[in-house]
Image (cartoon, helix red, strand yellow):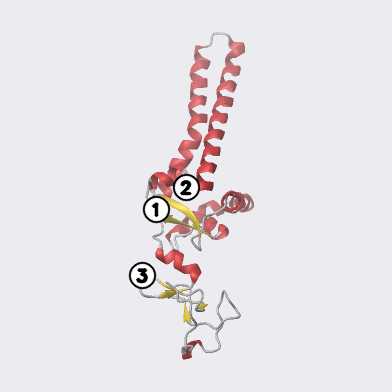
Amino acid sequence: MGSMFEPDSVPPQHLGARCAQHVDRPATTICGRCGSYACNLCRIEAQDGQEYCERCSSMVSRELADPGSRLIAFVVDRLVTGAPFIGMLILGFILNVAVDDTNDEGLVVLLCMSLGALGSLAVLCYQLHLVSNLGQTIGKRMMGIKVLRTDGSPVDLARLVFLRNVVPWLINSACGLFFLVDPLFIFTDERRCLHDQIADTIVVKVDRYPG
C-alpha cells in the first residue's frame, strides 16, 4: 500500500525526475512494470514486494483472465444471443414444410424470423444490463471473469459499447484484418486484446457467483 507521507530524501537515481502522473511532484520510485516514474502519492507496493505506479498496480494485484476463459465466454455469449433467432428460424422451416397452402409458406418463415430476432434483441439487452452493472456478460459470469478499467475501476456502458465494440468494428470495416489480429494480443504479458487497449480495459478473474 502506497505511503502518503513525503520521504526525507529522494533516492539519488530519481533526482530531477518528475512523476509521470503528477508532473509537479518529484519521483520517488520507478514502476516495476512499465518503468515510468511515480511519486509518493501514486506509488504502491504490491504483494510481490515491488513498487508500481497506481495504473499498473491494478493489473499486478489482480489475476488476469486466461485466453481459454475469455474464448469460452465469447463463444457462450454468441451462442446465447443467437440462440433465439436460430431456434425460431429452424422452427420456421419445419412449419414451412407442414403448411399446405403455398401462399402462406413464406409468411410462416418470416414470422418466425421476426420473433427470433426480437428474442435475440431481448437477450442482447439483458447482456448490456449485466455488463453495465457487473462488468460481466452471461459467458463472463459463467467463467468467473469480468471487465474493468486498467486502474481497477468499473467500466461505463458507453466505453464498453462504443470503444470496445463499435470502434473495432469500424476499424475492421476499413481493414478486414483487424479481427484476425485483435485476439492474438491476448497472448502477450498484458493479456489485452487490441480492443482492450482501445478501450483502456482489462479482463480479470473473479468469483463466478459472488453472494
Give the residue drawn at x 56%, y 88%. 16
Q: Is residue 155 left or right of residue 59?
A: right
Q: Nearer the viewer, residue 145 or 3?
A: 3
User: Residue 5's x, y, as percent?
Assistant: 48, 80
Give the residue drawn at x 53%, y 51%. 179
* Amino acid under disc 3: Gln
User: Residue 167's x, y, as percent?
Assistant: 61, 52
Q: Nearer the viewer, residue 105 or 116?
A: 116
User: Residue 62's x, y, as percent?
Assistant: 41, 61
Report the Cα–Cα distance between label 3 and label 1: 18 Å
Q: Secondary structure at mark 2?
A: loop
Residue at image mark 2: 136
User: Which picture quadrant has residue 51?
Assistant: bottom left
Q: Is residue 125 left or right of residue 44?
A: right
User: Residue 128's x, y, as percent?
Assistant: 54, 43
Image quarter in which the N terminus is found:
bottom left
Name the N-terminal-most of marks 1 and 2.
2
- Which residue lies most toward the left here? 48
Residue at image mark 1: 206
Name the N-terminal-most of marks 2 and 3.
3
Mark 3 closeness class: few <14, some 14–19, many ≥20 residues within 10 Å: few
Name the N-terminal-most of marks 3 and 1.
3
Mark 2 closeness class: few <14, some 14–19, many ≥20 residues within 10 Å: many
The reply to whether discs 1 and 2 touch (Cβ–Cβ < 8 Å) is yes
Q: Which mark is residue 129?
A: none
* Amino acid under disc 2: Gln
Q: Secondary structure at mark 1?
A: loop
Q: Nearer the viewer, residue 177 or 56?
A: 56
Residue at image mark 3: 47
Report the Cα–Cα distance between label 1 and label 2: 10 Å
